[in-house]
Image: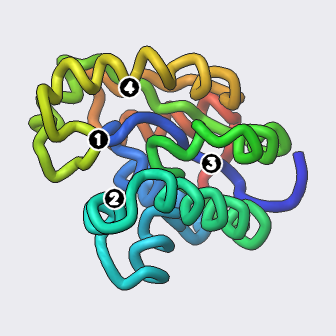
Amino acid sequence: MTAGPLVVLVGPMGVGKSTVGALVAERLGCAYRDTDDDIVAEQGRTIADIFVDDGEPVFRALERDAVGRALAGHDGVLALGGGSILDEDTRALLTAHRVVYLSMEVEEAVQRTGLNAARPLLAVNPRRQWRELMEARRHLYTEVASAVVPTDGRTPEEVAQAVLDALELKEA
């Protein structure tokens, strides 16, 4: 493992990366960072607005840059956007880090997010689109993961503990 984050969380939108990441960081006594938050702060607009105004390719380029900076400059817990693993260079960078894939099934996604239109990639027939996104991405999440932690039916606290256990990290 190289210098950088103690743990990187990946997984689909709505899986709880932000919530679990903040809990893991608190338990480890370190900082939490989310690359989606970095992009929003840098651009001064929401991710949905970036998608609508500039398109997905522009967003993915911003995301790739944000992930690269965060992997190089953050030493706490890092959460990546759901599609960040689509980029081959990002996946290559992740091989040097402890990565946990937080997984969930579509039924859990519906309960957690309602699969609403506020998520730009799920605007039409969200249940089908979520399944298609997962079919396209699941193998990429698995490819970069040091560990897989299922989140279905678990509280954020239980998932955070499972992340710590999976990586054998000790609480501060």
Label 4 sits on what residue type? Leu
Task: Judge from the rendering whether residue 134 lies leftward or rightward of residue 87; answer left or right.
Answer: left
Mark 3 neighbour class, 10 Å CA radius: few under 14, some 14 to 19, many 20 or more: many
Name the quadrant containing residue 16.
top left
| Residue 151 percent location from the top left of the image | 36, 27
Mark 1 neighbour class, 10 Å CA radius: few under 14, some 14 to 19, many 20 or more: some
The numbered mark, 1 or 3, whose residue comes first in the sequence reads: 3
Report the residue marked by disc 2. Answer: 51
The numbered mark, 4 or 1, whose residue comes first in the sequence reads: 1
Report the residue marked by disc 1. Answer: 121
From this viewpoint, is residue 111 visible? yes
| Residue 171 percent location from the top left of the image | 60, 52
Position of 20 relative to 115 (above/below): below
Report the residue marked by disc 4. Answer: 133
Mark 2 neighbour class, 10 Å CA radius: few under 14, some 14 to 19, many 20 or more: some
Q: Secondary structure at mark 1?
A: helix
Position of 119 relative to 128 (above/below): below
User: As rendered, which of 166 and 105 lies closer to the eye?
Assistant: 105
Q: Are marks 2 and 1 in contact (CB under 8 Å)?
A: yes
State how far apart marks 3 and 2 are (Cα). 24 Å
Q: Which mark is in front, 4 or 3? A: 4
Q: Are marks 4 and 1 in contact (CB under 8 Å)?
A: yes
Report the residue marked by disc 3. Answer: 8
Q: Residue at x 66, y 39 (%)?
A: 99
